[in-house]
Amino acid sequence: MTSINTTSGPHSAWLLGTGGKAAIVIAAAAFLAVAPFIGIYPVFLMKLLCFALFACAFNLMLGYVGLLSFGHAAFFGMAAYISGHTIAVWGATPEIGILAGTAVAGVLGAAFGLLAIRRQGIYFAMITLALAQMVYFFSVQAAFTHGEDGIQGIPRGHLFGLVSLEPTLNMYYFVVAVFAIGFFIVYRAVHSPFGQVLKAIRENENRVVSLGYHVNAFKIGAFTLSAALTGLAGATKAIVFQSATLTDVHWTMSGEVVLMTLLGGMGTILGPVVGAGIIVTLQNYLATIGSWVTVIMGTIFVVCVLTFRRGVVGELVNALRSGPHKE
C-alpha cells in the first residue's frame, strides 16, 4: 500500500520547533497550576476545560476529516447521564463513572459513524442531527435520566477510593489532568500516520481511495475516537456540576461546539481551546443579560466568518506563514 505524505495545510501545524512547543506546554501548565490562586474562579476554569476538550474532540471530525457533525451533543449528554447514574445510583468511584460514560459514548459514536458515513456534506450533517434527536427523545423518556428533572446531586466521591473530589481545588486539578490526557490523545492522533490519512481524506478522498486505503474504516475510527473524547468531556462535566440534564444532549449543544471550533480555528490544535475560552467567557460574564447572550454570540460569529474566516488561531498561523512582507 502506498504511503501518504501530506504537507500540513495552513491550519494544521504549529509554526514552532520542539523548543517552542515545549515552552507553550510549560507556560500552559504553569498557568493552570496557579490560576486558582490569582483570582480566577476554579469552577469557571473547570467548565472552560471541559468544553475545550469537547471542542478538540469535535475538531477531529470537522477540522481533520472535513465532516460536519450536528450530533455530538448526543455523545456529550449521554456520557453525562451514564456517568451520573453509575456514580449516584450504583455507587461507583468517579474514575469508573467517567470511563463508563466514555465507553458508552464511543460505542454510540461507532454506531452513528456506521450509519452516517454513507453520505457526505449536508446529508451527513442531517443524518447526525437526526440520530442525535433520537438520543434526545430517548433521554426524555428513559427512566434512569429522570426526564426533564435530569440527574441531580451526583456525588463527586473519592478518586480511586482515596482522594476526595469534594474540595474544589482537588476537583479542579483532576479536571486539568483529564483535559491534559484528552488533549494529548488528540495531538498524538493528529500527528500520527492515522492523522495524516485523515488529512488526506479531507483534501482529496478519491486519491486516498486510489492508493488502496479503506476510507470508510478511517472515518469510522475518527468518528469513534471523537465521540469517546466528547464523552470524556461530558462525563467529567457532569461530576464537576453534579448534574446531567437535557441541556447536555440538546441540539443547541452541538451548535455551541461548532461555533467554538469555527471561532477558534478548525483544523488547528489550539483553535478549539481558544474558541471554547471565548464562548465560555462570554457566557459567564454576559449571563446577567439573559437571552441577549445568544444574539451577541451570533453577531460575533458573523463578524468572525466575514473577517476571520480561518478563526482566531487560523488567522494567526496564516499571518506567521505569510511573513511580514507578504500580503
Image (cartoon, rainbow, N blue to C red):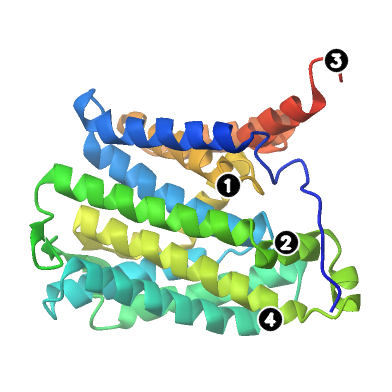
Q: Residues within 10 Å of mark 4 (few under 14, many from 20)?
A: few
Q: Helix, strand, or loop for circle 1?
A: helix
Q: Which mark is residue 325?
A: 3
Q: Which residue is mark 4?
A: 217
Q: Earlier in the sequence, mark 4 or mark 3?
A: 4
Residue 3 rendering spot, x and y as whole percentages:
82, 69
The residues bearing labels 4 and 1 have C-alpha atoms spaced at a distance of 24 Å
Under mark 4, the amino acid is Ala
Frontmost residue, 307 versus 17: 17
Of circles 1 and 3, which is in front? Answer: 3
Q: Are marks 4 and 1 in contact (CB under 8 Å)?
A: no
Q: Which residue is mark 1?
A: 261
Residue 145 rendering spot, x and y as whole percentages:
26, 76
Q: Earlier in the sequence, mark 4 or mark 1?
A: 4
Q: Residues within 10 Å of mark 1 (few under 14, many from 20)?
A: many
Number of on-image labels = 4
Residue 18 rendering spot, x and y as whole percentages:
59, 38
Residue 156 is left or right of residue 115, and the answer is left
Residue occupying the point 71% across, 65% down: 198
Q: Quadrant of the C terminus?
A: top right
Under mark 2, the amino acid is Gln
Q: Which mark is residue 196?
A: 2
Q: Earlier in the sequence, mark 3 or mark 2?
A: 2
